[in-house]
Amino acid sequence: MSGGFSDILRSLEERDARKLERKVPSWSGVSVEIPQSINFQQCSGEIAARYKASLVAPGARVADLTGGLGVDSWAFSQVASAVWYNERDAVLRDAVGRNFAALGVSNVAFNCFDISPDASDWQDALKAFGPDVIYLDPARRDASGRKVFLLEDCSPDVLALMPSLLSLAPAVMVKVSPMADVTMLRRRLQGYLSEIHVVGADSECKELLCLCSRPEVQLAEAPVVLFENGSIFCAAETEPDEKEPLLFVPSAAMVKSGLGPGMCLMPFSEPLSHFGRFWQVIENLPFAASEIKTLRRRYPQADVTARGVPITSDQLRSKLHVTPGGPVHIFACSLASSRRLLICTPYIPPIVP
C-alpha cells in the first residue's frame, strides 16, 4: 500500500485549506492551521465577516466571546482599536494566535474562558478590557451533536447572558441561524433587540444578526435590514404593478427578511436588482393542465420553478417533459391570487449613456 494514513491526512488538510481560501480569500497564500475540519465548516465567510465589522465604529473595542477559527475577530481587527478574542478550546485558541501572527494581526488579545452566566472570571477579564461591542456566535448543537433552534438551547445561552453582557458593553451583536424566524427573534429578545440584519451571499441567506442594546435606546419594533451583493435594503421601494411585463423573483435572503415585494410583476427597479432577479415575461398563461400539455412543443428546453402553487418544481418539470437548460425559464406561481404560468427570459436593463 502506497502513502498510508499520513498521506490521507495530508490530503484532507489540503482540501480544507482550499475550501477555506474560497471562503476567506484574503487568507489565501497564508499557511493557516485548522485543528479540525469543523472549525472551518462553522466559521463565517469573508463577506459576512466584513459586513459585521462595518457595523462597528472605527476605533471601537470589540470582544468576540465565541472566537472559533477567528474569521470574525480578524474582520473586527481591521476596524477596531483592539479585539478580545475568546475560545474555550485551548488548542484552537493557540492555533488562531499563530494564524493571526502569520496574517500580520497584532491588536488581538487571546483568551480561553468557558462563557456561562454564573462564572465571574470571564466577566472580570472582559470588564477590564472595556468593550464597546460584544459579539457572540452561539453553538447551535447540543452535547449529543443534535441541532437546536431556541436561543436558550444554544451554547452559550444568549438570553441568560444578555443582562450581564449589556452591563459590560452598550452593544451586543448575536449571530443566529439563517433558519431562525424573524418574528420569533423579536419576541425572544424583546427589550434588548435594536435591529435585525439579514446577510445574503451567493444567492443564499447566510446568517441573521441581532443587534441588541440597553432598554433605554429601544425602538417600538426592531427594524430589519437586508445586506446582499454589496447593497443594503431597508424597506420596500417600489409597489408591484400587475400590468408591467417584468417578473421579480426575490433572493432567499430577501424572502427571509420579510422586506420588499415577493414574487410579482413590476417595473424594473435598480435598487431591487441587488436583492433578486428580474425576468422578461414572453408569455403569461393560466396555470392549467391544458396549457401545460402544449408548452413542451413550444419550449422543449427550459428551466422550471414552481412557487406558491400546489406542485413542486420537480413535479412540474416531469409534467412538462422539458430538457433543462436553454434561454427560457418557466415559472408556475401565484400572482394577485391568480395562479399563472410565466414563460420568461433573463431581463437585461438598457444601458443608460
Image: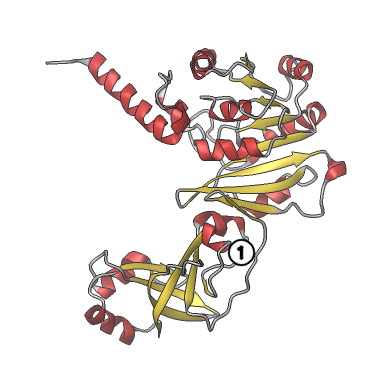
Image location of residue 142, percent across then percent down: 54, 32
Between 213 and 352, which is closer to the camera in this rendering?
352
Percent of width and height locating residue 4: 19, 15
Q: Is residue 264 visible?
A: yes
* Label 1 Cα neighbours within 10 Å, binned few <14 / some 14-19 / many ≥20: many
Type of colouring: secondary structure
Residue closest to the far bottom: 290
Residue drawn at (85%, 44%), measured in percent from left and top?
217
Amino acid type of the residue that numbered disc 1 sits on in the rendered structure: Gly
| For residue 56, above or below residue 320 | above
Q: Is residue 346 above or below residue 178?
A: below
Q: Position of residue 79 (x, y in %)?
A: 65, 30
Classify the position of the N terminus by image quarter: top left
The answer to which quarter of the image holds residue 110 is: top right
Name the residue: 42% across, 69% down: 347
Query: For mark 1, what is the residue?
Result: 260
Closer to the camera, 352 or 220?
352
The quadrant in which residue 58 appears is: top right
Q: Residue at x 74, y 15 (%)?
A: 125
Does residue 179 appear in the picture of this structure? no
